[in-house]
């Protein structure tokens, strides 16, 4: 496939095209199709943007209907019928059944816009500048969001000081024996710790970009209590692992917490259409009219598909049950792979349908597995500080048959990558010491 025009015209900043150097042309459900009609199983889902698959037929029908009827496409933040339906649906499907009250702020369309708004709200409400963020956290690459993002690759590109943030150890950062909440509390209590009193804590319950680091439910609960004790707002950035990724619509539901502010984006529209949302407790809504704006806060096509997504998948528990069943399939498969190569330094971690195969022994292994998998028709990415985690993000709606085929590709790719690096695991020996 001829990728020359991309090399010639597009900035060096391009990223994923390098991992998947083909020209994609069509996509349906969990299958991507390139210009040569090769098919790929998608275990990446637009970094968690396509939880309901590509071109979900139910949403597509609503979208086409809306476009055909000359529904308003761009509406700034004016009232439109599509937005009204979305608000009604959020209230009926998400808030009322949980007995929650949140005020909605529509921000610019991409995730970082929601994070910027959330940080502004917290700082305004508390009248403080500092924010606690976590090691390996990722919250976007615009100024404010970048300041709370840990990854040096992104931070170094800023060109200015990234201030007003204190990074604290995420759950398990110093190993299982160190209680990082106690460390943070010690610093908050000590007036000479050097920690400026924070307005808020921003956290991902599972760090997607940071390497599929999973906070325990206990830690999440303790973090909420810490916030209450020290008068800090709790912001849960549910942009990647919300919208069902961990099994429930919000990722923190099983921890039983009530964040003050929640950010949503990626899979919110359900169709890959840009849309972001901030949910805040009503008393935090101290905005002056128009004090935060954005031309694209009213992507009505996204409202239509987001409404369809909530109505189709989230009015009962059936979809959650389905996600949990698939989680077990993926988990069992990966654990089996890990046990097949006991000396390879492999491990599994994740929650719901975000699962990581960690290649502790040799960080470069994850990348080699991913590229071997791509050669065999599987789109999958790595994450983590050294890209040492193979990150599985299949669509929540993926058919069992495609899920199994994808897992088979991973298993084969692990075997091949290990054989290449001279690691003769048990599985390889079973086949006469030859790489399959
Ligand atoms: C992707 C992501 C963002 C940023 O979203 P963009 O749409 O890329 O701006 C923020 N937070 C988390 C947790 C993310 O995964």
Image: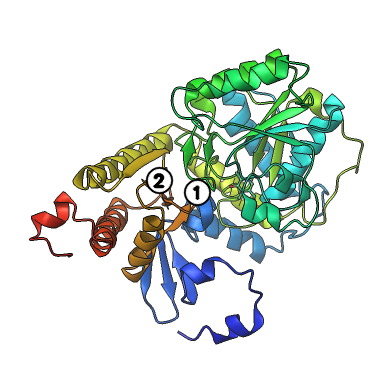
Q: Is 16 positioned to the left or the right of 406 in the image?
A: right
Label 1 residue SS = loop
Of the two numbered discs 2 and 1 in the rendering, the one whose residue sits closer to the viewer: 1
Answer with left or right where residue 78 lies relative to residue 146: right
**Disc 1 packing (10 Å; few <14; some 14–19; many ≥20):** many
Residue 157 x, y percent position in the rendering: 71, 59
Helix, strand, or loop for circle 2?
strand
Q: Residue at horizontal 73%, vertical 44%?
A: 147
Nearest the eye: 145 or 345? 345
Q: Answer yes or no: is residue 99 visible.
A: no
- Asked whether the residues under the numbered discs 2 and 1 touch, taking CB atoms below 8 Å apart as contact, a structural biologist would say yes
Image height check: is 90 above or below 141?
A: above
Of residues 333 and 302, the one nearer the viewer is: 333
Query: Crowding near pointer 2: few (<14 within 10 Å), some, many (20+)?
Result: many
Residue 21 lies, in percent from the top left, at 47, 75
Residue located 18% across and 64% down the image? 435
Q: Nearer the viewer, residue 404 or 210?
A: 210
Residue receiving disc 2: 356
Left or right: 398 as drawn, with respect to 125: left
**Residue ranking furthest to the front:** 192
Q: Could you say where residue 59 lies in the image, as x and y percent from the top left?
A: 54, 55
> In the rendering, which numbered label is found on residue 180?
none
Residue that badge 1 annotates: 384
Quarter of the image that includes the C terminus? bottom left
Residue 243 point in image, percent of width and height = 54, 41
For image coordinates 50% across by 48% down, the residue present is 384
Q: Residue 299 or 187: which is nearer the viewer?
A: 187
């Amino acid at each position: 496939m001829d990728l020359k025009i991309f090399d010639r015209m597009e900035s060096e900043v391009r990223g994923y095209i390098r991992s998947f150097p083909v020209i994609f042309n069509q996509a349906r459900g969990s299958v991507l199709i390139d210009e040569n009609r090769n098919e790929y199983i998608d275990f990446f889902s637009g970094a968690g943007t396509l939880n309901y698959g590509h071109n979900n037929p139910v949403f597509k029908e609503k979208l086409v209907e809306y476009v055909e009827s000359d529904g308003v496409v761009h509406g700034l933040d004016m009232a439109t019928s599509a937005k009204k339906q979305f608000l009604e649906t959020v209230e009926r499907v998400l808030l009322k059944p949980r007995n929650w009250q949140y005020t909605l702020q529509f921000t610019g369309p991409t995730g970082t816009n929601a994070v910027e708004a959330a940080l502004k709200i917290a700082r305004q409400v508390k009248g403080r500048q500092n924010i606690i963020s976590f090691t390996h956290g990722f919250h976007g690459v615009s100024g404010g969001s970048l300041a709370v993002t840990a990854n040096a690759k992104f931070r170094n590109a800023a060109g200015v000081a990234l201030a007003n943030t204190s990074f604290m150890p995420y759950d398990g950062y110093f190993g299982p024996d160190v209680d990082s909440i106690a460390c943070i509390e010690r610093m908050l209590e000590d007036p000479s710790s050097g920690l400026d009193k924070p307005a808020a804590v921003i956290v991902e319950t599972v760090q997607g970009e940071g390497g599929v680091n999973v906070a325990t439910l206990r830690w999440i609960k303790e973090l909420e209590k810490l916030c209450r004790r020290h008068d800090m707002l709790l912001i849960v950035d549910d942009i990647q692992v919300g919208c069902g990724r961990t099994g429930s619509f919000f990722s923190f539901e099983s921890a039983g917490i009530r964040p003050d502010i929640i950010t949503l984006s990626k899979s919110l529209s359900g169709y890959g259409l840009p849309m972001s949302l901030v949910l805040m407790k009503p008393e935090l809504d101290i905005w002056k009219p128009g004090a935060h704006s954005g031309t694209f806060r009213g992507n009505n096509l996204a409202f239509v598909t987001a409404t369809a997504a909530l109505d189709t998948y989230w009015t009962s528990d059936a979809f959650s049950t389905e996600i949990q069943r698939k989680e077990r399939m993926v988990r069992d498969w990966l654990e089996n792979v890990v046990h097949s190569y006991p000396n390879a330094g492999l491990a599994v971690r994740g929650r719901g349908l975000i699962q990581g195969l960690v290649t502790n022994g040799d960080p470069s292994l994850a990348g080699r597995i991913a590229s071997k998998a791509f050669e065999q028709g599987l789109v999958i990415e790595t994450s983590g500080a050294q890209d040492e985690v193979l990150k599985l993000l299949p669509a929540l709606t993926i058919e069992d048959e495609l899920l199994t085929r994808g897992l088979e590709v991973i298993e084969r790719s692990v075997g091949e990558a290990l054989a290449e690096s001279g690691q003769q695991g048990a599985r390889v020996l079973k086949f006469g010491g030859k790489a399959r």
